Image (cartoon, coloured by chain):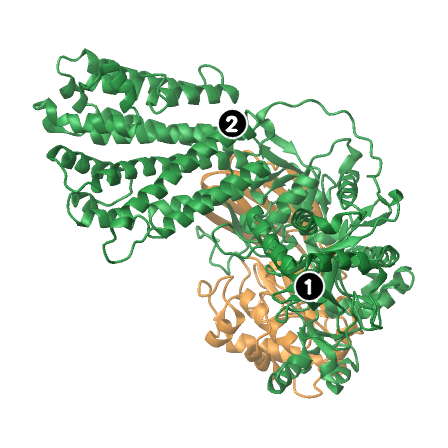
Chain colours: A orange, B green
Amino acid sequence: MIYRMRHTTLYAYSRPVDLSSHILHLTPRTLPGQRVLAHALQPQPEPVRQSSGLDHFGNVVTRLFLEGAHDELEVAAEATVEVGFPPPPAAALTPPWEAVVRSAATEWQVAEFTYASAMAPADAAVGAYAGESFTPGRPVLAGLIDLTSRIKRDFKFRSGVTDLATPVSRVLADRVGVCQDFSHLMIAGLRALGLPARYVSGYLRTKPPPGVKRRIGADASHAWVGAWLGAEFGWVDFDPTNDLVVQDEHIVLAWGRDFADVSPMYGIILGGGAHTLKVGVDLEPL
Amino acid sequence: MMLDPTALDEMADGRGGLRPHWQELLGTLVGLGSEQLIERATMLDQFFAEEGVTALLPGTGPAAWRCDPVPLPIRPAEFAALEAGLAQRATLLDATLADLYGPQTLLEHGIIPPALVYPNHGFLRPCRSLPVAGQMQLYAADLIRGPDGEWRVLADRTNAPHGMAYALENRRALSKTIPEIFRARQLRRMRPFFDTWQADLQRIAPGGTGNPSLVLLSPGPRSAFWFEHVVLARELSCTLVEGGDLTARDGQVFLKTLGGLRKVDVVLRRHDGRSIDPLELDGGDGLATGIPGLLDAARQGALVIANAPGSDIAESPALAAFLPEIAAHLGVGPLTLPSVPTLWLGSPGALAQVMENPAQWLLRPALDGVAPPVPLAELAPALREVTLARAAANPCEYAASLAIAPSVAPCIGPGGFEPRPIVLRLFLVRDGEGWQALQGGLARALAPADALAGRLPRQAVAKDVWIASEDSGDIQGPSAFAVAALPIRRATGELPSRAADNFFWFGRYLERLEGAARLLRTTIMRLERASLSPREMAELRTLAACLKASHLIDEDAARGAGTPAFPRAILGMLRPEARIPTLAAQLGRMVELLRDRLTGEMYGAASHAIRDLQAALRAVPVGRGENPRALAQFSEALGDVLVFAAMVSGLAAENMVQGGGRLFLDLGRRLERARSITSELATLLDEPQAAAQPARLEPSLRLALELRDSVITYRSRYVTVLQAAPVLDLVLAEEGNPRGLAFQLLAMRDSLARLGDTEGSPLLAAVAAILAEARAMSAGTAAAARQSEAATRLPPRLDALHESLGELSDAVSRRWFALLPEARAVGGGLAADAAAVEGAAA
């Protein structure tokens, strides 16, 4: 599947900003299963300095520095991406989840995603919720598919109820949130069991395939969960907001321990007064 | 820390004799006698208190640094072995950091468990892409010597180790208070270490420029180690800066000075790495104290940060358990100076080993090198059980070190000599390819309540560390480092904008306090009289109005002038939260903020005087009951304020280079004084009935002269006749009256011109306009047929001048201090999810 993606972010300030710097995770990753055919990043006004490189997780990170007074900043990210992740193996073929826990502890690049992080902290209640899907000896993939479905079933998607500061314990108690909350909840739950889980930021196609109901979160940045099935099968992505195993409707921008590692656009401004933000996302199949 | 009978004695050899390197020293000390030694210990305490060697701001607590009169001598051969062993450890830890922030082969090959790195808050992922060469320029270690006579490392300090300034200060204090012990002894000097360090900071500067600009980045006076930062900045010729002084532009970092932006090449970091750049790191108060773009500049090689942010991961106590394997993997030979045997409880079998005999172990958080270790032997059984259960539940989060009894050395206690356990901190700095140790150190004598390691305690008994010089070859000079001839600089441009701002406000607060003191003394003088004449009563009411205009008392209190409630309102100004103590505290804070910009003499005198002043104010008896002495004592304390203000002027004239800070100090004072003249005069002349009855203005005119200290001048010119025009001329227009308005304006004009403002500049034009208006008011009154009536019409014009002076102050701030607005974070929300699609703030 080939998609054209367009993501615009516009900051408007009530007073001119003297100096600003921004850090962007807006370039899709190149992965087995995801090819970036074209990509462009257009900031307006032109920054005095733009630097980019790979971050610790292998994501492309871009930094923008603006110096002249400006009362607006628009960043348009465009890309053409071919995506097609292999279907997951049969659940019964995957190892028992306890074996995955054991091998994750010493697998140096995987172990990082077993530790609690600020936005996916260790929480006993969240761990217990996730634990219901992982009965002793259950193949890890069966548990993951079950947990993904349960989150979709048990939680109500509603925007505006939670924000970045809402802890997963609150989300669990209120059973309401958005894709980011569900992802953090699932990640925290898996890590509580010792299973590696990472936060994936990206997009979901805007219009669903023919005959399929419109997906949630399709007109915006989206987030889901990467989980590790052991050395043989590696990482597979799960979308708890839509109860999906990620295959060809998602494109991956970046991954990290939680949202804080991969925020699409984060900045520090000096001056500027109040500000408004407009975001537009479009992902169309070609 | 309990005294352990098996502990080795640094001084006695265990066979009834003294170790040879103690004999001479102990002979001198015993010769002084224990009474004398206890007295010297007290003198040492006084010395540190007076020098302001404290971790805290003046006035906030009495916790001065303490040093024991008995130094800790170390044999040169023994020190050489320690130096070599520590140099090897520094090399190893530096290579470990380079690997963990680089290729991570230590993780890949399973030498270090991932649990020691990834959950470590000190592991700063964005720093992985910094150029790795030279992660660490400075290293320190805390050592103890066990009963077997071997030194072992209890804690490695790889982040921003502290204590060198205290080591210098201990030596200086000891040589002043107990000079006898230094006679006939050659000690190695500590100075060469700082030369080497400075040369190293110059060497690592990008581009190898001949005269790189070095800054010491400090969290500022709120840091517990501010004293050390001030001393190090001075010793290393670094500019002492806070985050707000620096700004990243176009991939480079600059210091904001009066002369514009000046490029920074090397940052000596004393700031928490986690909050150093809020764009890329989200730790602590980075938004307020960090520099957005700092890491970007470091990443592209425009500046070097030493030690690199994130270097504290090598301080993790659990790492000690893996150092021998790390050394083998990285090709560093077997460690000649080992750690205290340490286990990481996440390792197989380690937990069981500790459970077997808990009393043998010190329990420590695996990743936090600052938290004090817990001696399991000293815990009550129930608490020990809880502690062990906690460790057993999360073994990966704990390490355990063998509880080795540290050696003891003699200290002076209340009853003379007493042995105390010793922890020794030594410091090494990179010297080209190798490492060089400070030829001395910081020993800490542990009191029973002191923890074994962890942060340098704020209150500790330190010991000077002595290494005897065997021959003159020991006294090393700095390594040769070519520096191009320096261009002569005389401009005021080098002064950081923040320092200029602080001087300006120091001047303003000082004048504000002085003005309040004059007004209050004048008022109290009248309150002390047994009975007041109608004229004096009128004066008192006018003074009350002035006090209210200066925000010293409120409306109600001002109306009470002449009633018994009024003296109580005056004494109420001494409440800790009231104006006078607040101003005194603000001044103390400014002196501390400016500490690195004042000569030692000036800092010492000023901080001392402020403390005395605060003590005098506190000593005024402001109880519930009437105390006839209270007002008099308050007045005396206010007299001290006036003496202090005069002293600062004198110190500034004698100790500060003309220009820069002194100009701003003066500018602030003149501006504040001009403002108080205008508001005071507006209040005094606000006598509408005087238009018809000129006599009603007399008390005001008399006070105008008295408050401006101009009574004698007036009398010498006009004898006893009080008229409005001559009074106003003296207060507003007379250029030679140092308490008059014209004098302040002319002085401001001179300061601005010296700062480089040329004629017609907005600031000079504003000063000229104010001066012209002041002259016009004076001349207009003189020309009026009815002077008193003309004078009573002046208050609105004086109020307008007061406003103009306020605007002038803002203009000075904008022109010179150009402080950037507060940094704020934007973004971070997921678009649709955060309901931010249209018009919502992130």
Q: Residues within 10 Å of mark 1 (few under 14, many from 20)?
A: many
Q: Which quarter of the image is occupied by the N terminus of chain B?
A: bottom right
Residue B103 is left or right of residue A277, and the answer is right
Q: Nearer the viewer, residue A227 or B309?
A: B309
Query: How far apart are the alpha carbons under marks 2 and 1?
Result: 44 Å
Residue B343: percent from left, percent from top: 77, 75
Q: Where B517 falls versus B76 (above or below)?
A: above
The answer to whether dots 2 and 1 both sit on one chain is yes
Residue B313: percent from left, percent from top: 72, 61
The residue sitting at 77% across, 61% down in the picture is A32
Q: Nearer the viewer, mark 2 or mark 1?
A: 1
Classify mark 1: helix, strand or loop. Answer: strand
The residue sitting at 75% across, 49% down in the picture is B182
Badge 2 amino acid: Ala
Q: Where B791 falls versus B365 (above or below)?
A: above
Residue B512 is left or right of residue B445, and the answer is left
Q: Chain of mark 2?
A: B
Residue at the spot of label 2: B653
Quadrant position of residue A239? bottom right
Labels 2 and 1: the sequence-earlier one: 1
Residue at the spot of label 1: B411
